[in-house]
Amino acid sequence: MVTRKLNLWILIALLFFGLSLTTVSCSSDDDDFIEEPGKTQSAFFTDEINKLIDANYAEIQSKGYGELIIPSSMFDKNIMKYADYHKDVMTALNNLGYKTYINGGAVRDAILGTAIHDLDFSTDATPEEMKEKLTGFDVVITSTAAGNIAQAHHPNKDWTDMVPIRGVNELLRGKSFVPDNATYGTFSKNLIDDTYGRDLTINSLYYDYQNNTIIDYHGGLHDLRDKIIRTVYDPNTMYPINASALIRTVRFAARYGFDIDDVTTKAIKNNMKYCRETISSSLNNYYITKGFGDGCAKRTYQYYSKYGFIDFFMPLLKGYAGTKDYETPLFHALDYAESKTKMTISLSMAILFQPVMQKELSGKEKTLENITAAWDKLEQGSGQKEIFEIDDYSGARTAMLNTFYVYFSLTDASLSAEAKDKLKQNASYAEGTLLVDAYKK
């Protein structure tokens, strides 16, 4: 999925702190959905639709793909809720003879009955054609890592991402799970080709805007219904090509409380090295820590621990993660914090590293200067800094260190009333206070 542009500072800041670009939170109302065993309770999965899903799945298991179209007569098309100005762009393209498909997370979220926070659509028009022919819109061609896209900018400062249908990666040429008539390269007219640029089956669903149908080529509906996380094609082939998909596999499993299928589980362990070899440090930070801002920090930690992410990406927790002395109070703290507030990445990380900082600062005066020095020492000595190659995340760094400063100040029995009042002026006072309450015995 094409995401909104992030400048470098923001991307680095996401390492430990606050900003989150989630498409759906796994907290609050969603918990009723994710915690129930078995198949999902989404109203979309009627007996009639389930029969189509099951009949189609055998073909997918056999050859890796198989087209499944759910007609509009089988579901309420009003599940797709998004702004009219997005519809206006798609209608204009349809009137010009082009096809338009809402893709990825927006379709997934609509099926699950959650709000659509980000909408992209795929089209068989090229960015240049869209800029030339959509004369009634302010269309800008934007460069992304995956190639050019077009954006229709609207008067309210929002925009619509219009992504050309992508051809299949040349590295997949000749693979048995790719159709013989696939188009390789930048653009394609065949929607199925676009799926091979996506990571998980649940993220490779499409809604045909013109015909009001849902299209599934790789069993994404089956996996949403049965709470399974799988990659669109063989994970041992995908992960060396797209290592970020490996991280997203575990993060999405944690977000929804889904199981990861056995083949994918083995592939995660066998291909972890590619996360360091092929993903830039800032993107590693972004993909790994983003899960802690999804509203399910405890489950994210549990999944990350289970699949080796904590050991691999957070060596600061070596000797802590997996031990009862660390995890019993940690889980209590995370449960408490999640019951009180919408979790941010910054608060999650402060809770995770509180015991580490507590030990490092033992016997030392808890000044901001000493806290900063302790964090530097921990980060460098553990290899954490080398993994993430952090050169400058000053704003985010200040936020975390101040959270710890508030925490240690409030737990100091000798703190005067005057000092307490002054402490309230600290921008991280609320999170520091919550950190105190979360770790109370």
Image: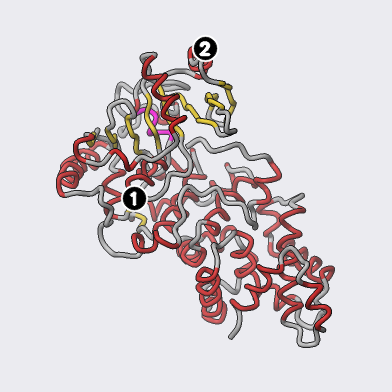
User: Residue drawn at (33%, 34%), measured in percent from left and top?
Assistant: 207
Local packing at callout 2 (Cα closer than 10 Å; few below 14, some 14-19, many 20+) is: few
In the rendered view of the protein, which quadrant contains the C terminus? bottom right
Magenta stretch in the rendered image: 192-197
Q: Is residue 16 left or right of residue 80?
A: right
* Residue 250: quarter of image: bottom left
**Residue 356: x, y in percent?**
67, 73
The type of residue carrying mark 2 is Glu
Q: Position of residue 59 (x, y in %)?
A: 20, 38
Q: Please name the residue shown 44% across and 50% down the image.
A: 249
* Residue 154, percent from left and from top: 55, 28
**Up/down of 37 relative to 128, above or below:** below
Residue at 55 percent across and 79 percent down: it is 329
Q: Report the amino acid beneath label 1.
A: Leu
Vertically, is 337 above or below 183?
Answer: below
Magenta span dominant secondary structure: helix
Q: Is residue 51 magenta?
A: no
Q: Which mark is residue 343?
A: none
Q: Which residue is mark 2?
A: 132
Q: Quadrant of residue 206?
A: top left
**Residue most toward the top?**
132
Q: Which residue is mark 1?
A: 112
Mark 1 and mark 2 lie on one chain; the one further toward the N terminus is 1
Q: Is residue 264 left or right of residue 431?
A: left
Graded by Cα atoms within 10 Å as few (under 14), some (14 to 19) or many (20 or more), the crowding at tag 1 reads: many
Q: Nearer the viewer, residue 265 or 203?
A: 203
Dot 1: element: helix
Does 426 sit above or below residue 192?
below
